[in-house]
Image (cartoon, helix red, strand yellow):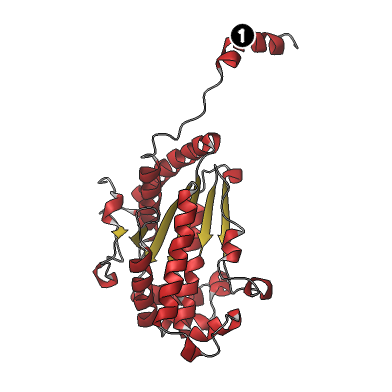
Amino acid sequence: MKKIESKEYRAYKDFNIVDCATNENFGKSDKVLKKELSAIRRELGEFQDTIYAHGKYSILVCLQGMDTAGKDSLIREVFKDFNVSGVEVHSFKVPTELELSHNYLWRHYLVLPAKGKFGVFNRTHYENVLVTRVHPEYILNEHIPGIHSVEDINQTFWDKRFEQINDFERHLAANGTLIFKFFLNLSKEEQRQRLLRRLALKEKHWKFSPGDLKERKLWNTYQKCYEEAISKTTHDHAPWYVVPADNKKATRVIVASILLQSLKKYKDIKEPKLSEKIIANLDDYEEQLQSEK
């Protein structure tokens, strides 16, 4: 399989969602793609150990996409070979009463990854410029001064929110967080097929909600909101990658490859060396342990 180049999926400020592919298989079978992922994630898992020992960077992986885009299964498969203590996954649902009593970024600050660890956000702080933009009435639940009705929520409001998110990510990056943002670009037809499978298979019924059909009717509105959000918040310190999502196995290979390729560019990430004093006494330490037999 050809080498995956992260720049091929990188979104820039002139990003246009209709120009981005939704399907990819690299001309390979599912079996081959699965084998490719297995090799990449093992290497990624080993590198995570080095990142943990190095202890100076934290990694934030943000996943966004329409319903059924495959975020849950991607997390399960890409991070399967990680030390469980080295990665934390957080799924953000409808804000609770407590969360709504704080600013919209508060709940995300609370669960940011510590240095040496990976944090995966399944749906992210971008819900606050996506779902709430499609449904601006949700903003009223935040009790923001000066916002009394939907009519008060204008373009200036959203531009300020984009800038707040940019400031948030700029602050994280300046303090050692490496940020990767992935938009899983699913086609509307593939979403239809996945929803039909949820209805057809009893074991998948629990995943289905009538609300999925309601949101599906707003597909074009969501696509437009994604396009603007990505365009206004993609930066070198917090890049967006637009990944074809119709073929889940290829999607996982692409995401894992981008992570591994990008992280390995940080040549300072190395396991710390033992001090000269400890090295000089290694034989003594071994002798102490051997003498315990």
| Residue 51: x %, y % from top left | 50, 38
What is the residue that sits farthest to the right in this orientation? 292
Label 1 secondary element? helix
Q: Is residue 171 above or below residue 195?
A: above
**One can see residue 28 in this view:** no
- The front one of 3 and 117 is 117
| Residue 177: x %, y % from top left | 48, 49
Left or right, residue 14 beside residue 286 = left
Q: Quadrant of the C terminus?
A: top right
Which residue is at 40% across, 41% downward? 39
Left or right, residue 164 beside residue 6 = right
Count the labels in the image: 1
Say which quarter of the image contains residue 143: bottom right
| Kind of residue at badge 1 | Asp
| Residue 106: x %, y % from top left | 60, 65
Which residue is at 46% across, 49% downward? 174
Which residue is at 42% across, 58% downward? 181
| Residue 149: x %, y % from top left | 53, 90
Q: Is residue 106 above or below residue 4?
A: below
Residue at which label 1 appears: 283
Which residue is at 50% across, 30% downward? 271
Q: Local crowd at mark 1 within 10 Å, few (<14), some, or many (≥20)? A: few
**One can see residue 289 in this view:** yes
